[in-house]
Amino acid sequence: MPAPKGNKYAVGNNGGRPRKFESADEVYEKGLAYINGMLEQEKHLTFTGLCIALGVVKETFNDYESGKYDTDNEEFSSPLKDLKQRIENYAELKLFGNNPTGAIFALKNYGWKDKQEIDTNVSGEITVTLEGDLDKWAK
């Protein structure tokens, strides 16, 4: 249903909510400001903290990161992937500290695993040779 006549908020709106960010540079600068500010204060970097600094929820961040809002003129996904990778790298470096428990937990949220995966599938042919009195074994 279209907006009622005289609705000044509908002027120039082609439908849907406006984008959260006008430019990829704006997002990147805000993200770097969060990262640098936290490091200067010697505070931990988190993905959630980055989202709060950008003024978005994680799902919106993931939409921009996925390329959903990329256009021919503006690519949001690359700067956001870079910012997220910087946060992941921070957590990765914390693995070498005295208490890496929090870093391990954070990295698991990035898809890391702390278990071994062993492939027990066997392919190829197996040949069994029986020697001796086969009648004795068959009884």
Image (cartoon, rainbow, N blue to C red):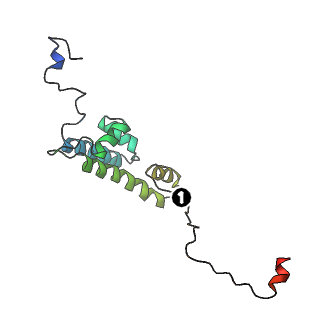
- Label 1 Cα neighbours within 10 Å, binned few <14 / some 14-19 / many ≥20: few
Residue 51 pos. (x, y %) = 34, 39
Query: What residue did someone put label 1 on?
Result: 114
Residues 133 and 110: in front is 133
Q: Is residue 138 above or below residue 88?
A: below
Instruction: Give the percent coordinates (x, y) of residue 57.
Output: 36, 35
Q: Secondary structure at mark 1?
A: loop
Q: Residue 116's spot in the image, x, y percent?
A: 55, 63
The residue lying at 55 percent from left, 63 percent from top is 117
Q: Please determine whether, in this image, residue 105 is positioned above or below residue 114.
A: above
At x 62%, y 78%, the residue is 126
Q: Quadrant of the C terminus?
A: bottom right
Please provide percent x and percent y for residue 27. 24, 42
- Residue 90, picture quadrant: bottom left
Q: Amino acid at mark 1?
A: Asp
- In this view, the residue farthest toward the bottom is 132
Does residue 54 lie above or below 85 as drawn?
A: above
Q: Residue at x 27, y 45 (%)?
A: 67
Q: How many discs appear?
A: 1
Judge left or right: residue 67 versus residue 5: right
The residue at the point 28 percent across, 42 percent down is 64
